[in-house]
Image (cartoon, helix red, strand yellow):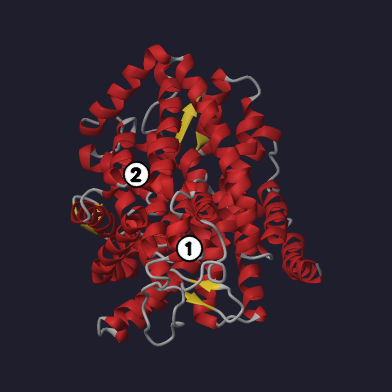
Amino acid sequence: MKRILLSILVFTIPIITFAQETTEKGLDQKIDEAFQPVSDFFSSVIFFEVFSGAPFVIILLVLSALFFTIYFGFPNVRYFGRAINVVRGKYDDVERHGIQGKAEINTVDGDIKDTIRDESKEGEVSHFQALATAVSGTVGNGNIAGVALAIALGGPGATFWMIICGLLGMSTKFVECTLGVQYRDVGEDGTVYGGPMYYLSKGLKEKGFAWVGKITAVLFAIFCIGGSFGGGNAAQSNQATIVLKEMFGLQSTGAGFWIGVILAVLVGIIIIGGIKRIASVTEKVVPFMAVMYVLACIYIIFSNFSFVDDALGMIVSEAFSPKAIGVGGLIGVLLVGFKRAAFSNEAGAGSASIAHSAVKTKYAASEGLVALLEPFIDTVLICTMTALVIIIFNSGGAFEYGGDGTGVVFIDGLPYEGAGITQMAFAEYIPYSDIFLTIAVVLFAVSTMISWSYYGLQSWKFLFGRGKTADLVYKILFLTFVVIGAAASMNSIWAFSDAMIFAMVFPNMVGLYFLFPVVKKQLTRYFTAIKESRS
């Protein structure tokens, strides 16, 4: 408790001092003006274009996902049922005893021999908890605000490309999360450390490219810290602030700042506890909020069932012949869909493998199978339902697709963006839905922030060591970005967030291309164990 109070005190004193010194100009505007150049710089660097306005990172992400899908024989389809059985615990007995009582693992320098030797001693969370923690990092306001942004910019057709990207992303998630468990490290106290930082440094050393592994591991850790500040934090508090201000009618120029302070204190209390507390929170909150949100979407969809076929028709037809003003034709709508889907499910960014690394299992591939469910839940299911709700809402011409070209659309003459568009769609069909959606957005935001704080902290530890002082410094910085996200504009925050999330793709893909044969070997080993257990 003393540590929690100290952290909050250290964090809030400079924030309050800053607030007192900026009374002449609105707090939110001042923060936004200071942050905008930072956002523009990172966005221009990461999203460099190669042809027809297509950023290289998007092309790399999609083609890599397609390659892994083909190489592993469409695991997103073939192993879907088995992945569900792993989460259900059907193969727990196999994972507990292993093949002849011993797991095959890497033994490179820096690893602990027989790291995954005993399920009762190694690993911190169950398959379901690891999935819930990782899903809480992906199922967030990318599903509510991100989908609304995609449709506002690219029209209904953007949804089609989001679904395609989600299906392909299942294969990438499978690869990176298998590697996350395979090359994880375990501290003397049993704490698990894993993720791309470890499979890059260890795995590439095994292949004889130690220096490449060290460089890419450091780069990933840096980008992941940035991602935890951006997409996993600032973007979330930004959207939570939008709906809270709308619900309570807050027009003050400093309202976003103070909402950010409140959110930062709430998140700060939770993240002090580490992965076990995060897992205990997310395994309860994430399924509840996801189910409630999906049920609300289903209610709206079935209430307007006669228009569903028209909505689906628009999603498919406008994917190839977009009508949204200023979207830039087929390439434009495709990029909008892929970008928002990749931001939402993070397949290829490597972040989820950090959470999955903490699972209790002897078989790395078992958690890879669990992980492939994430893009399906996040993008194929939840994002598509959100899209249908917005498209149905706009069937009467509530707003013009394309808007002002920045993601803002005008409904009844008033500007709306992100979660605000989804909020208007819900309000059309569900009484008092503004309260429900506000709660959903805030819960999505908080759950995503606490999961991403774990991702960023793991990367921070990789760079600066595992001391308490280093941890405290990271958490203070993380909480500061909660406030920045709440105060700054949606454009600058999402540009920065996109850049940080997609920057992680570059070093992560180096590891995936070097190490995917290891994944094949681990998958065969796991399936062999299951087969032997039945004989």
Check the image and report above or below for 406 versus 475.
above
| Residue that protrudes farthest toward the front in the picture | 535
User: Which mark's residue is nearer the viewer, 1 or 2?
Assistant: 1
Question: Which quadrant is the C terminus positioned in?
Answer: bottom left
Q: Is residue 414 among the parts visible in the rendering?
A: no
**Residue type at tag 2:** Phe
Q: Residue at x 30, y 35 (%)?
A: 160
N-terminal label among 1 and 2: 2
Specify few, some or many for label 2: CA neighbours under 10 Å numbering under 14, 14-19, or 20 or more: some
Q: Tell me the residue that label 2 is attached to.
A: 80
Residue in front for this viewpoint, 188 or 396: 188
Total marks drawn? 2
Tag 2, which secondary structure? helix
Check the image and report above or below for 306 versus 481.
above
Check residue 96 in the rendering and tell me which mark sits there, or answer none: 1
Specify few, some or many for label 1: CA neighbours under 10 Å numbering under 14, 14-19, or 20 or more: some
> In the picture provided, is 192 more to the left or to the right than 79?
right
Check the image and report above or below for 69 versus 356.
above
Tag 1, which secondary structure? helix
**Residue type at tag 1:** Arg
Q: Residue at x 31, y 86 (%)?
A: 211
